[in-house]
């Protein structure tokens, strides 16, 4: 991972004992990716900010219970963000349904919008599941370039590959991810 602050596993251990500097390092390291993911879930800037904040607060509170399978906290953070987003959407739908009376024509529109949003969230779940199935090097390239937004040249340098190889792997991974999502729609 990053030399400044250590690995995510090290930071997680420090978080479990209440180290606020470790929280700052984890936030700086993963907030951009979590924020981009939250934009795919939420519809407003305020909701995105709330999702990101709630994700990191949950990590802080549950740090002693978290076990990471790989060297990165990012998958745990993204799943937590997704779950918090789903909970918020359900609360909002319940609240909206409570406000609408039974004769309102808007109720059908609200429920249709809710189902469309749930469908989009399911697509994201399929994408994340498919990313997990990629070869380790392709998964790392996806995390760096597609999730973190790193330039191909930076990923190539860190992974000891040519820029062309990174471009080819990104293209192949994107095609695989698109295929996984579109096949599930059929």
Image (spheres, rainbow, N blue to C red):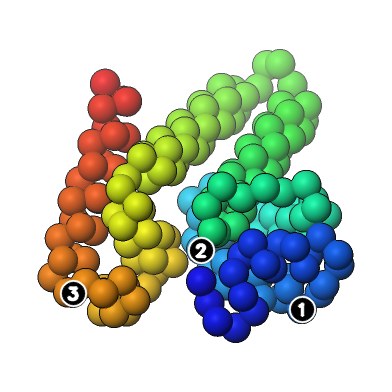
Q: Which residue is mark 2?
A: 33
Disc 3, SS: helix
Marked residue nearer the N-terminal end (1 or 2): 1
Marked residue nearer the N-terminal end (3 or 1): 1
The spot of residue 5 in percent (x, y) is 64, 79
Q: Is residue 178 left or right of residue 4?
A: left
Disc 1, SS: helix
Query: Between residues 111 and 144, which one lies in front from this camera angle?
Result: 144
The spot of residue 183 in percent (x, y) is 26, 27
Q: Which residue is mark 3?
A: 163
**Quadrant of the snapshot with the C terminus:** top left
Q: Which residue is mark 1?
A: 21
Is residue 152 visible from the viewing direction of this image? yes
Q: Residue at x 31, y 57 (%)?
A: 137
Q: Is residue 31 left or right of residue 12?
A: left
Callout 2: few (<14), some (14-19), or many (20+) C-alpha neighbours within 10 Å?
some
């Amino acid at each position: 991972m990053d030399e400044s602050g250590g690995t995510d596993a090290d930071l997680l251990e420090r978080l479990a004992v209440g180290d606020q500097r470790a929280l700052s390092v984890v936030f700086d390291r993963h907030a951009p990716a979590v924020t981009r993911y939250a934009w795919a879930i939420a519809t407003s800037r305020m909701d995105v900010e709330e999702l990101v904040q709630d994700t990191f607060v949950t990590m802080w509170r549950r740090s002693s219970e978290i076990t990471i399978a790989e060297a990165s906290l990012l998958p745990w953070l993204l799943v937590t963000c997704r779950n918090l987003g789903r909970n918020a959407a359900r609360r909002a739908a319940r609240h909206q349904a409570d406000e609408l009376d039974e004769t309102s024509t808007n109720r059908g529109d609200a429920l249709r919008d809710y189902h469309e949003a749930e469908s989009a969230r399911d697509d994201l779940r399929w994408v994340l599941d498919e990313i997990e199935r990629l070869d380790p090097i392709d998964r790392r390239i996806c995390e760096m370039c597609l999730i973190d937004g790193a330039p191909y040249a930076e990923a190539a340098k860190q992974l000891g590959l040519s820029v062309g190889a990174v471009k080819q792997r990104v293209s192949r991974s994107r095609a695989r991810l698109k295929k996984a999502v579109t096949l599930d729609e059929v």
